[in-house]
Image (cartoon, rainbow, N blue to C red):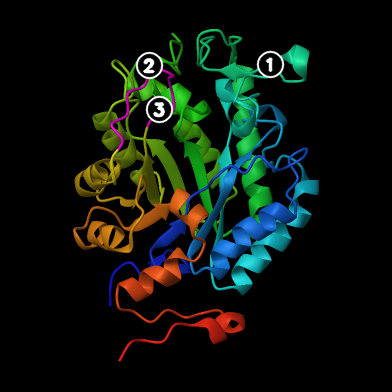
Amino acid sequence: MSILVSPFNIKNVHLKNRIVVSPMCQYSAKDGFANDWHLVHLGSRAVGGAALIIQEATSVSPEGRISPYDLGIWSDEHISFLKRITAFIKENGAVPGVQLAHAGRKASFDTPWNGSKQITEADGGWKTVAPSAIPHTDGNVAPEELSIEGIEKIKADFRSAAKRCIEAGYEVLELHAAHGYLLHQFLSPLSNQRTDEYGGSFENRIRFTLEIVAATQEVWPPKNPLFVRISATDWAEGGWAPEESVKLSAILKDKGVDLIDVSSGGNVSYQQIPLSPGYQVPFAEAIKKETGALTGAVGLITEAKQAEEILQEGKADLIIMARELLRDPYFPLHAAYELDEEPEWPEQYERAKPRKKG
């Protein structure tokens, strides 16, 4: 059997294959509440055969949202509809996961289809926070430097959100420390110029991320997987670097994190990314080989044979896909046929199931 469509277990969670739906913001919520769009978007990927569905960056506080249209889980009132989504995902043979996030200085922006422009307080946005008062892009309003009290509040927000995730029915929790959002902002010297215990040295810059991990572990069941998504590099001189990602991943593994979801970039507007198929896979490979941690590979992985090769060569343990699964929610079913395997189809769709040639 090909590795891509073979089962994989992480702690008490059984994945029927190695294909994971990456968290992808839909910018379709109101006041943080999920709705039918999210149910259909996430549910259709479960019907399509993916093993693990990770819900988009879900904010731990209103001010932590990327946009006014992000999902949130800062209130108990958010839980009811989320339960409906997780129940549907489970009923269709997949595992529901969620990514908890705080956008930091990249909060209070408009949707991509409206230009992704910063929304100022005067236009209905909100004051943003960050490790240092450095805007993401020249011309943006600078964020407010977080006080120690502010840091403690965010840690409490993550803890409370993780507790709600349990009640909502999620079985995998991912912490977002990538793409230039708040945890990544603390990691990188390009966005973190603090002189206290949260800035300067590598040990100080990773402190906040480790404290967020510890805060969520206070409530998240040890039997359930905990992932952390990182940006392996800032793709900018003087920024967060691949060797630091290896060091951090080793520490996260020792702290009980079960898998490193390895992406890159997003922290500065002047990044230079050499895009090509599978361009981020070498980072996942390095972390896996140098630390022994489980890793997820992402980044322009679009074909079944390409994904299978990554797994066959031991470069990662899971394939975490985004845009290809937007184009084709049934990619896992199609991939199985391409790899000469016979996938299990939804009973409701059996009449359309292709028959093997010969």
Residue 270: in magenta span: yes
Q: Earlier in the sequence, mark 1 or mark 2?
A: 1
In this orientation, which residue lies closer to the viewer: 256 or 342?
342
Q: Is residue 239 above or below residue 348?
A: above
Indicate the quadrant containing the C terminus: top left, top right, bottom left or bottom right: bottom left
In this orientation, which residue lies closer to the viewer: 339 or 104?
339
- Secondary structure at badge 1 equals loop
In this orientation, which residue lies closer to the viewer: 146 or 32?
32
Residue occupied by mark 2: 189
For the residues labelled 1 and 3, the Cα–Cα distance comes to 24 Å
**Residue drawn at 38 percent across, 51 percent down:** 259
**Residue drawn at 65 percent across, 35 percent down:** 157
Residue occupied by mark 3: 206
Q: Kindly identify the amino acid type of the residue bearing the numbered disc 3.
A: Ile
Residue occupied by mark 1: 127
Residue 277: in magenta span: no
